[in-house]
Image (cartoon, grey):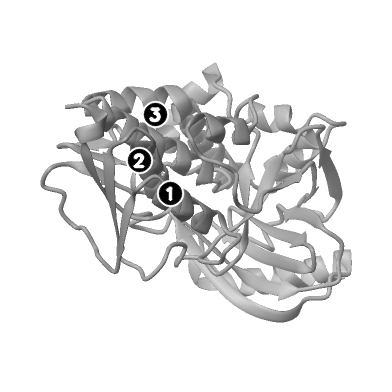
Amino acid sequence: MTATSRSIDIAGAGLAGLSAAITAGRAGAHATVYERSRDVGSRFSGDFQGLENWTTEADVLEELAAIGIEPTFDCVPYYETVLFDPDGRAHECRDSQPIFYLVERGPGESTIDRALYRQARAVGVDVLFQSACGVLPEGGIVACGPRRADVIAVGYLFETDAADGAYCSLSPKHSREGYAYLLVRRGRGVVATCLFADFHNERYYLGEAVEFFESTLGVKMRHRRRFGGAGAYSLPASAHRNGILLAGEAAGFQDAFAGFGMRYALVSGHLTADALLVGEPSRYDARWRARFGSELRAGLVNRYLYGRLGALLRTFLAIQLAHKASARSRFRRRYANSILKSLILPFARRA
């Protein structure tokens, strides 16, 4: 069957599902996306998130352009961030290339969610809202997001006069086995704690994080609005099940260490559609493993060590990552293969 006569059903209008739909539409296939919510980006509230740019030498926007995703959304490069170690000492991380891109999530006009929706519609994709697709009898792509919560983020959206900046605290006072962050852009800000354990005490950790950033940086947060979300990560043996290809967090494609998953979602969505377009769904597993399987494995090992070595490792990371102007390469080393990571991986998977 040729691409132009192919019809692909996709469950979920998140980043992974829309990326798959754009790939199909650009190839001349007909794609139908089934979405349970009323609109795209309904999981989010206009909060800022980071599109990571360190796991590959190539810029993430170049990779997205190569798979047909245009940066028609607000996408602000950040060349530096400040890491606070468990003792509250600041360590500046810089690079001549963007460490990450700040994007907005949600149904708003400037969000990445809305931009992908417009791109999908432009290539003829049908998006059916309030239409859950629990069964795909002819096969297809499932990109419905996480089915469980391995990590949660709770925080506030606010207005401020503070200067633009990105800050991260590794103190266990501000997060259990995770981190807290503060992002400011043009008078708007997001402060949150990312928890990988002890979820029921999220109010305590968030309160401690807010107090720390306010007192340390002098940030005044006005008109605060609460938000929250959850994510899931795993290292699947296969993301291909009886003609169904899993993309994004539906497959567990999320960085287990830091919780960054947008890049994996966009790339995996493209790979699912590409495999179906050529009539070879079985090759999907080999392709996602080749593209980011090693990063997923490294992230799982990093998560295992981070949760067990405590404040010592957090201080070491802050010092190591803040070294002159090479933050991207130093971040990338955390996701590189090594003999030690291979030896630790079985323990990390069991844990």
Q: Which residue is mark 2?
A: 25
The residue sitting at 82% across, 58% down in the picture is: 164
Front of the two marks 2 and 3: 2
User: Marks 2/3: CA distance?
Assistant: 21 Å
| Helix, strand or loop status at disc 2 | helix
User: Marks 1/2: CA distance?
Assistant: 9 Å
State whether residue 92 is above or below residue 39.
above
State whether residue 40 is above or below residue 251.
below
Q: Does the CB distance between marks 1 and 2 fall below 8 Å?
A: yes
How many other residues sit within 10 Å of disc 1, few (<14), some (14-19) or many (≥20)?
Answer: few
Q: Please identify the quadrant where the N terminus is shown.
A: top left
The residue sitting at 40% across, 30% down in the picture is: 346
Amino acid beneath label 2: Gly
Disc assigned to residue 288 = 3
Precedes in sequence: disc 1 or disc 2: 2
Amino acid beneath label 3: Trp
Q: Which residue is mark 1?
A: 122
Q: Would you say residue 216 is visible in this rendering?
A: yes
Q: Would you say residue 232 is visible in this rendering?
A: no
Q: Does the CB distance between marks 2 and 3 fall below 8 Å?
A: no
The residue closer to the viewer here, 1 or 203, is 1
* Relative image position of residue 185 (x, y in whole percent): 76, 60
User: Marks 1/3: CA distance?
Assistant: 27 Å
Q: Does the CB distance between marks 1 and 3 fall below 8 Å?
A: no
Amino acid beneath label 1: Ala
Precedes in sequence: disc 2 or disc 3: 2
